[in-house]
Image (spheres, helix red, strand yellow):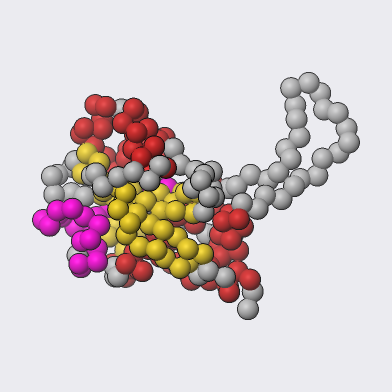
């Protein structure tokens, strides 16, 4: 058995205690978003949901069936991203012209970070008890509509799924937008996620979720946080 298939990694997933109101956020702007991100990074206003044992081989299976883009060997990629492994690049012993410099290390791919986050989200839903046969990735639209399409639709109305929503009379499906980063998290990511939900979450009974998987700067471990979104 390969190292990627034998190791497991803990992922702590929490929920932000305050539902994010799109109508209120539109008036308060980036200041409130920065406060929310600061809360998460400092462990404030969070309710622990689950601590998952992530087996990378299983993560690879979720990647094949649920994520938008095809990434080979996501299990191996996940472990490299988890430990922060960045291979060095070759640098000739030659001085470059002014204003140019060599790239010393490979950077983490945004596509891979995104597919890791989407796979972790489905892994989390499955672990929570949500019927993931009722979860599907939405087709992305190109052009001007692209920013207004969330990642997932969740049709499960079970108690497990309802545990993520603060009201009982919400309307299915619940739409979810997922963001991931190996470099921490910031308010711009959250703002983009909310923009992608804003055109879908229209009625008082509509609910959305934002799931953010990020490397915690305090200990460099991956963590997950769920935000509930309402009109």
Magenta residue span: 158-179
Name which residue lies at 58% across and 74% down.
6
Q: How far across and how far down the image is residue 93, in percent?
A: 89, 36
Q: Is residue 111 left or right of residue 2?
A: left
Furthest residue in direction top, as rendered: 98
Q: Is residue 109 left or right of residue 191?
A: right
Name which residue lies at 33% across and 56% down.
48
Q: Quadrant of residue 134?
A: bottom left
Measured along the vertical axis of the image, is residue 63 above or below residue 180? below
Measured along the vertical axis of the image, is residue 192 above or below residue 116? above
Q: How far across and how far down the image is residue 218, in percent?
A: 51, 46
Name which residue lies at 14% across and 53% down.
167
Q: How far across and how far down the image is residue 221, in percent?
A: 51, 54
- Residue 68 drawn in magenta: no
Q: How far across and how far down the image is residue 180, in percent?
A: 46, 49
Furthest residue in direction right, as rendered: 93
Quarter of the image with the N terminus in it: bottom right
Name which residue lies at 27% across and 60% down.
154
- Residue 162 drawn in magenta: yes
Quarter of the image with the C terminus in it: top left
């Amino acid at each position: 058995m390969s190292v990627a298939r034998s190791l497991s990694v803990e992922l702590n997933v929490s929920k932000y205690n305050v539902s994010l109101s799109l109508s209120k956020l539109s008036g308060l702007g980036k200041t409130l978003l920065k406060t929310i991100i600061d809360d998460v990074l400092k462990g404030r206003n969070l309710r622990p949901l689950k601590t998952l044992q992530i087996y990378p081989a299983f993560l690879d299976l979720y990647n094949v069936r649920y994520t938008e883009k095809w990434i080979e060997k996501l299990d191996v990629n996940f472990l490299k991203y988890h430990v922060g492994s960045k291979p060095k690049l070759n640098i000739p012993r030659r001085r470059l012209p002014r204003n140019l410099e060599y790239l010393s290390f490979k950077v983490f791919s945004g596509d891979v970070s995104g597919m890791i986050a989407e796979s972790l989200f489905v892994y989390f839903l499955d672990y929570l008890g949500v019927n993931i046969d009722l979860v599907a990735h939405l087709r992305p639209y190109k052009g001007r509509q692209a920013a207004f399409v969330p990642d997932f639709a969740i049709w499960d109305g079970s108690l497990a799924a309802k545990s993520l929503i603060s009201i009982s009379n919400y309307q299915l499906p619940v739409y979810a937008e997922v963001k991931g980063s190996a470099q921490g998290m910031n308010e711009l990511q959250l703002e983009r996620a909310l923009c992608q939900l804003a055109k879908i979450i229209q009625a008082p009974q509509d609910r959305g979720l934002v799931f953010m998987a990020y490397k915690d700067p305090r200990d460099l471990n991956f963590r997950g946080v769920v935000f509930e979104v309402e009109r």
